[in-house]
Image (tube, coloured by chain):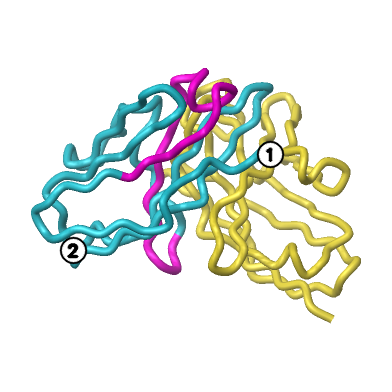
Amino acid sequence: QVQLVQSGAEVKKPGASVKVSCKASGYTFTGHYMHWVRQAPGQGLEWMGWINPNSGDTKYAQNFQGRVTMTGDTSNSTAYMELSRLTSDDTAVYYCARDRRWGSSSDAFDIWGQGTMVTVSS
Amino acid sequence: QSALTQPASVSGSPGQSITISCTGTSSDVGFYNLVSWYQQHPGTAPKFMIYEVNKRPSGVSNRFSGSKSGNTASLTISGLQAEDEADYYCCSYAGSSTFVFGGGTKLTVL
């Protein structure tokens, strides 16, 4: 079945970087954009950006420009999200989510990973 | 890009209908028919419920419906059931290949 499996929880110190992985299975990885969304404890969802795994093109939310890097490895159908210069405000669950449309970005995210908790603490 | 505005909470009794609003601007909700809705139970990932304002993906109950008027989109759940108790989030395309979520609404089934 179609699924996204993310890497495990991380604990990082302020100023460090974190890289979260999202392994896709059950569909053609290069056919769908991959989005990243985060959710701070007790808070709402925040869209971070997307990557087109076919071309490597990316689009980042303004809030994360200069701090986030999204990449994809087509050889193992895995997307990555790296966030640098972490602060306590970055403590959140990070989700990868597949765009529902084939070949382009649409309006919705139909398959979600299970989430990766990233804790930033000194 | 500011988050879309949703009520913090709504409630209803089993069998009733409720509506959750999602207010944006003429640059996002009002301009594009690209609003989606997600249901999230505690401790789990969001679930895709509605796309393109009012379309249901396969497998989603027809008790869930979406609509839009001006800068406000709405999710209506009819025939409320206990398992509908969850957080609900709207999301809109906001131009330039970007997206914005609402702040989320907690639905309580009384």
Q: Is residue B27 magenta?
A: yes
Q: Is residue B53 above or below residue B85?
A: above
Report the residue at 79% width, 61% height from top: A18
Q: Which residues are magenta?
A: B20-44
Report the residue at 75% width, 75% height from top: A11
Q: In the rendered image, which residue does mark 1 sit on?
A: A49
Task: Identify which residue, A105 or B102, lies in the foreground.
Answer: B102
Q: Is residue A47 above or below residue A103?
A: below
* Quadrant of the image occupied by residue A12: bottom right
> What colour do you see for chain B?
cyan
* Quadrant of the image occupied by residue B33: top left
Could you tell me residue A5's position as x and y percent? 54, 55
Task: Identify which residue, B53 or A118, lies in the foreground.
Answer: B53
Q: Is residue B62 above or below residue B105?
A: above
Gap between marks 2 and 1, in whole Å? 34 Å
Q: Is residue A111 magenta?
A: no
Q: Quadrant of the N terminus of chain B?
A: top right
* Quadrant of the image occupied by residue B11: bottom left
Report the residue at 52% width, 25% height from top: A106
Could you tell me residue B82's position as x and y percent? 18, 63
Question: What amino acid type is highlighted by mark number 1?
Answer: Gly
- Is B59 on the left or on the right of B26, as rendered? left
Q: In the rendered image, which residue does mark 2 sit on?
A: B82
Task: Identify which residue, A28 or A97, lies in the foreground.
Answer: A97
Q: Quadrant of the C terminus of chain B?
A: bottom left
Question: Which chain identifier belongs to the yellow chain?
Answer: A
Which chain is mark 1 on?
A: A
| Mark 2: secondary structure | helix
Instruction: Answer yes or no: are tags 2 and 1 on the same subunit.
Output: no
Could you tell me residue B108's position as x and y percent? 27, 64
Could you tell me residue A24's position as x and y percent? 55, 45
